[in-house]
Image (cartoon, grey):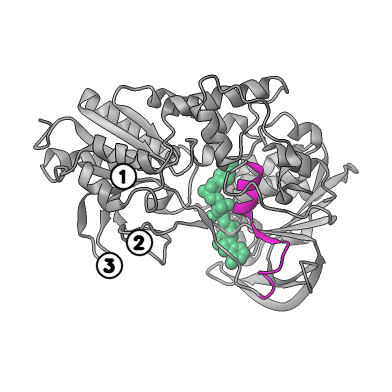
Amino acid sequence: MIGSVVSPLRVAVVGSGPAGFYAAGHLLNATGSSVRVDLFDRLPTPWGLVRAGVAPDHPKIKSVSRVYEKIAHSAGFSFHGNVEVGTDVTHDQLVRAYHAVVYTVGTSAGNSLNIPGAELPGCHLATDFVAWYNGHPDHCSRHFDLSHERAVVIGNGNVALDVARMLALSPGELRTTDTADYALKALERSAVKEIVVLGRRGPLQAAYTVPELRELGELAAADITVDPQDIVLDETSQAFLESGTATLGDKKKLEVLSAFAARESADKARRIALRFLRSPDKIIGSERVEAVRVVRNELTSDLTARATHETETIDAGLVLCSIGYRGARILGVPFDERRGTIHNDRGRVTLEGTRQPIAGVYTAGWIKRGPSGVIGTNKKCAHETVDLLLDDLAAGRLPDPVESRDDLLSWIGRRSAIVSHAGWETIDRHERRLGEAQGRPRVKLVRRERLLECAASEQGDLGVEAPSDEGPGCRA
Ligand code: NAP
């Protein structure tokens, strides 16, 4: 017995991104051999945003996957890919077969802009573009028109900088990455010469971090421009900067932007233009995006953006809207529609509109607290949740399962081709081998059926994934 629960403790973790692995790792560390952790993912592959979100030219950030692989080799851990909770198995079924269920499903949907013309072809969520260039199976058939010379990115977070940078990288810089093959070809043929990034507030309020900002000044094939007028601070921002509240990061951000503003053009093939205090109020075009009408903002005394009457029109063929993510509801799991997260109290899932915990149901990561922080932030967040789970275990608050875990897994296996960790390792080896031949970390398999076929094969020796022009969506 562990606490009041029949041994071994059985926990289902749903979502195999950073938060899911950190939750699994902490459970395994804290309880040792007396826990059985089943990690489910709707994709045949693990790692969540580390595989499908982190920019391909940031391999160091992706190297955190080594930590996850170590966890995956722990006794008591199993991976079950290609299993979607809500489709292949229900929340209720999990609750009946496990002492605890921990949801770490992330926030999969991008926020959309509610302005006229946002529905026009050529206007996309940045999150879809990110998933496309990262070879996410659900996004590999999308089409992004890169035939126009200008793209506009709306938003001032790190994702906005990621997509701007990906549009600005030279073929040489891209070719050493694990960008999906079709996207690599499309980006290499891209006609985009200028990427305009619009922040609705001022430079001090930009959400991106200093290293990511600084990186824009080091691109081989793209200049960076900042209009000196755009970074003149309003009174409230200036007072904030001079107060004790401003962080070193705030000061550095302004320093970097000032250095960009003072730079001479190096006549590179492309350029990224950072603009501030600008919001789009209309996407213009008859059949597709042709331009963005932008209104100049001023900051109010509480540092929110207020539109002025001054407008300008920026010609563009591609608009990427990068204004944050939100989560999606899972049937049977209380959801906070306003925040776009699972309804919870520090990680204990609570009944909607109350702080009353639902015994044995937990959450961690972006779906618990919203899309914020770096990958490591999810470690602390997952540990907080698992510590509460362990408190509940010790206090005898976890319900005993009423159904067999093995029966449930067999039932799921009859409906869906489950990818085990060994199956994922076959995919991993295969992708890395293809990558090695090209001096890249891996060549990703992008189609679900191809991933399943590879996972099921002994050697994973499937030859090269069908080349780029495979889908109508994969052309530049
Ligand atoms: P984010 O950091 O929350 O930034 C969202 C941006 O959208 C903000 O600039 C926000 O401006 C703007 N915005 C929101 N609503 C808007 C609207 N209606 N019109 C115009 N702009 C609007 O979100 P994110 O970029 O999606 O990043 C999510 C998390 O992932 C962040 O914690 C980020 O640091 C992290 N991330 C890290 C890396 C990295 O470390 N390299 C890479 C990618 C992502 P306001 O401030 O005015 O609301």
Depicted 130 relative to depicted 170: above or below: below
First reached walking from the N terminus: tag 3 or tag 2: 2
Question: Which residue occupies the extreme right position in the image?
Answer: 267
Q: Tell me which corner region of the image, top left, top right, bottom left or bottom right, holds residue 299.
A: bottom right
Marking on residue 353: 3
Q: Is residue 360 above or below residue 202?
A: above
- Give amino acid for label 2: Phe
Q: Is residue 132 magenta?
A: yes
Q: Nearer the viewer, residue 431 or 226?
A: 431
Q: Secondary structure at mark 2?
A: strand
Q: Is disc 1 surrounded by few (<14), some (14 to 19) or many (20+) residues within 10 Å?
A: many
- Residue at position x 72%, y 64% in the image: 121
Magenta-tinted stretch: 116-134
Structural distance between the alpha carbons of marks 2 and 1:
14 Å
| Residue 101 locus on image (x, y percent) | 28, 45
The residue singled out by tag 2 in the image is 335
The quarter of the picture showing ligand 1? bottom right
Mark 2 sits near ligand 1, with its Cβ under 8 Å away: no
**Along the horizontal axis of the image, is 128 left or right of 313?**
left
Q: Amino acid at mark 3?
A: Gly
The residue lying toward the viewer, choosing from 122 and 423, is: 423
Q: Secondary structure at mark 1?
A: strand
Query: Does any portion of residue 394 appear in the rendered image?
Result: yes
The quadrant of the picture occupied by the N terminus is: top left
Q: How far is the residue under mark 1 from the one under mark 3?
A: 20 Å
Please name the residue shown 31% across and 44% down the image: 102
The residue tagged 1 is 102
Name the one closer to the observer, 75 or 161: 75
Q: Residue at x 30, y 37 (%)?
A: 410
